[in-house]
Image (tube, helix red, strand yellow):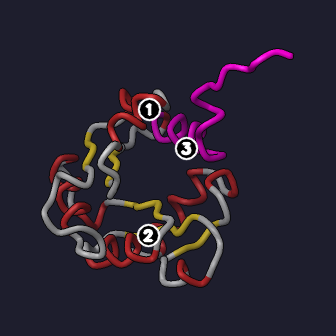
Amino acid sequence: SSLRQTSADDLMLPGVRQIFEQASHFKLKLGVASASLNAVEVLERLELLPNLLAVADGSTVSRPKPHPDIYLWTAGALRTSPINIIVFEDSAVGITAAKTAGMVVIGVGSGSQLNHADLQISQLDAMSLDSLLQHAENHR
């Protein structure tokens, strides 16, 4: 038997790489606001860190989600207004935090806990980034 080496794409949710590529095409600024304390290490392993202008993790701000602090910090690091940010979020507390920050939120996943997002998709590759941006524009 042979052992297959795990690649970064094997560890990534479906559609993440495509979203990053499409965001680059649209010249969008990308950031991550994660409650995880090892967000930077995970992003490095996934080979996504070079694409990000801002990374906030569980140690960046003192008040965690559902407080908006981590999203507001990330908006500041990206040098953009919260109303210009679209958040992809998979948790109810994250959706609450991003909406409190004044951002458009796309819930990723299934379940009623994501119902208060501005738009809900089953997974990132369910829609093109162009379509997601158009939906987000309608919620501003």
What residue is shown at x 75% (from left), y 18% (from top)?
A: 3
The magenta region covers: 1-24
What residue is shown at x 66% (from left), y 56% (from top)?
A: 127
Q: Is residue 33 above or below residue 64?
A: above
Which residue type does callout 3 highlight? Ile
The label number, if any, that marks residue 105 in the structure image: 2
Return the x and y of residue 55 as percentages of the image width and height: 27, 44
Q: Is residue 116 magenta?
A: no
Residue closer to the observer: 17 or 44: 44
> In the rendered structure, which disc, 2 or 1, sits on the residue that comes first in sequence?
1
Query: How many C-alpha atoms fall within 10 Å of the one at disc 1: few (<14), some, or many (≥20)?
Result: some
Return the x and y of residue 40 as percentages of the image width and height: 32, 37
The label number, if any, that marks residue 19 in the structure image: 3
Query: How many C-alpha atoms fall within 10 Å of the one at disc 3: few (<14), some, or many (≥20)?
Result: some
What residue is shown at x 32% (from left), y 58% (from top)?
A: 35
What residue is shown at x 33% (from left), y 60% (from top)?
A: 85
Which residue type does callout 1 highlight? Leu
The label number, if any, that marks residue 48 in the structure image: 1
- The N terminus - image quarter: top right
